[in-house]
Image (cartoon, rainbow, N blue to C red):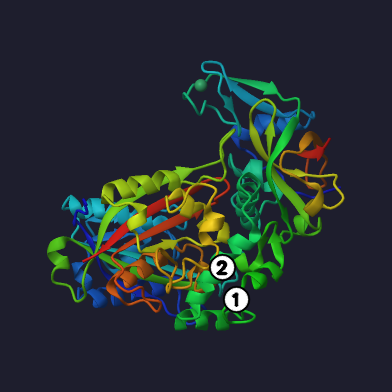
Amino acid sequence: MPNRPQPMFPEHDTQAFWDAAKTSQLTYQVCKDCSTVVFSPRAHCTDCGSENLDRRVSKGAGTVYTYSVVRQNRVPAFAEMGAYAVAYVDLDEGFRMLTNIVGVGDPTKDVHIGQRVQVEFEAQDSGEYPIPVFRPV
Amino acid sequence: MNQARNAAIVGLYEWPKRVDPDVSAMEIKALSIHRALEDAGLKWSDVDGLYDANDGEGGGGLGLAPYLGLHPRVIDTTSVGGTSYEFQVAHALRDIAAGRVNVAVLSYGSKAASQRIPIGTGGPRGAGNWQANMENPYGSTLISNYAMVAMRHMHEYGTKSEQLAEIAVTTRAHAMRNPQAVQAMQDLQFMNIREITVADVMESRVIADPLHLLECCMVSDGGGALVLASPEIARGTKKKPVWVIGSGEAIQYKRNGGDITTSAAAQSGPRAFAEAGVAPSEIDIAMIYDSFTITVAVMLEDLGFCKKGEVGDFVTGQNLRWDRPGLTLNTDGGGLSSNHPGMRGLFLLLEATRQLRGESTSQVAGAKLAVAHGNGGMLGSTHAGGTVILAAD
Ligand SMILES: [Zn+2]
């Protein structure tokens, strides 16, 4: 199994996001006062400052906004992956997240801006939190 | 033109060696301050404003003032990554204009090469905070962060790698005229220390698609210092003052639905030009943070030197070389080919000042106006942009 760096706790803003990941749920927040979509997770609305946020479960479908293929990373867990694609994915619910695009033959050829992708939760040797990554559909 | 003369750069020093096992980062800072004060004809005890980026051994003003042996009246520890120095010049201008400071010093010291700090391809930064917990699992290196900007720029505007490569070709041409930059490339064991071509850049290996090795800055030791002073003091210093006529600060970051190809410079640039009362078309020298080719490309657009999406054509044909008419870019050789110890913002100000004094190794005849624009943090996510506009006396 992959051996990626795990999120580290205690950390209040991101705890609920990662707890949800354990049950294969990708969560985001929406402001109850102004309807702004908030991501990365935090305790306030970035548009109006409201503390009144609703946590929702995403369908996990999105579009690659941009990406790069990392050819060199000195961290052992990534060095052993070979070339891999990092990306910003725009989820259909309106939030953008940093992630990896997996399940492609050659990431330098098989990942594209505008590509439709779906979340999956990758179990880890390195700890209890599976990591949400995306695969082309 | 507005061009208020409220504060001037009166002294500078750039640490000449890019691999230097014989000094500490703190020594680089202190000795550079001493030599920059000598350059100005000012004394150690004249310093009453200290600006520090939390570099050296850390501690900010609290660490540096005791080391230097000073009791400044203003202590500013603005630390926004590589553009800390443009922010600090903005603050020094404000403090001098308000009469709180007469002689301000900025300094930088780093042993990034000697300590083999893997800045571009290193591991996760920080641990257990709101950003790190969402980023560290994905292995996005600093270089891939910038590369994602390049990929989107190419997608939206048709920009080509060959066009970005032109920027690296220009800065290398300037580096070959700068003996300290040539020495740097020798000490850092660069291959093929000579002027390079677009083909050379394209044939260098890809580090993170679409960025090639020769589109990435070096990791060096280095540092330096800058002295600013009030108009009253600037009139009596050794060299002609170089006036700070405008400044702008901004932060940009990843936003849902945001445009990654537009940087903080799109906010800081207009603020600085408005304060200076000059237009981008009047600028002779652009010292723009070249951590990577894409950094320069995006900032040339955001500062208004060309329209968004048109930088590919703007840089094609080596138009920004020192010996061509019009705007001239990064005449010291830049971070790509002269020095990059981690936070290059100070060197932008040093070389812009040298140009307006007539002291550059790629001197543009009659240079009157320069812009120094720094970038701190990560262009593809959270970053700071600091713009400073300088005028010859
Ligand atoms: Zn709100």
Q: Label 1, on which residue?
A: B196
Q: Quadrant of residue B348?
A: bottom left
Which kind of residue does numbered mark 2 sit on? Ala
Question: Do the CB atoms of the residues marked 2 and 1 lie less than 8 Å apart?
Answer: yes
First in residue order: circle 2 vs circle 1: 2
| Residue B21 shows up from this direction | no
Residue pictured at 55% horizontal, 23% vertical: A36
Residue pictured at 71% horizontal, 48% vertical: A86
Which kind of residue does numbered mark 1 sit on? Ile
Front residue of B96/B391: it is: B391
Relative horizontal placement of residue A45, taking residue A61 as reference (left or right):
left
Front residue of B277/B47: it is: B277
Q: Position of residue A135 (x, y in %)?
A: 81, 39
Q: Position of residue A131 (x, y in %)?
A: 76, 40
Q: Chain of mark 1?
A: B
Q: Quadrant of residue B191?
A: bottom right
Q: How many residues crowd around disc 1 within 10 Å: few (fewer than 14), some, or many (20 or more)?
A: some
Q: Label 2, on which residue?
A: B168
Residue pictured at 36% horizontal, 45% vertical: B270
Residue B349 sits above or below residue B36 on the image: above
> How far separated are the C-alphas under marks 2 and 1?
8 Å
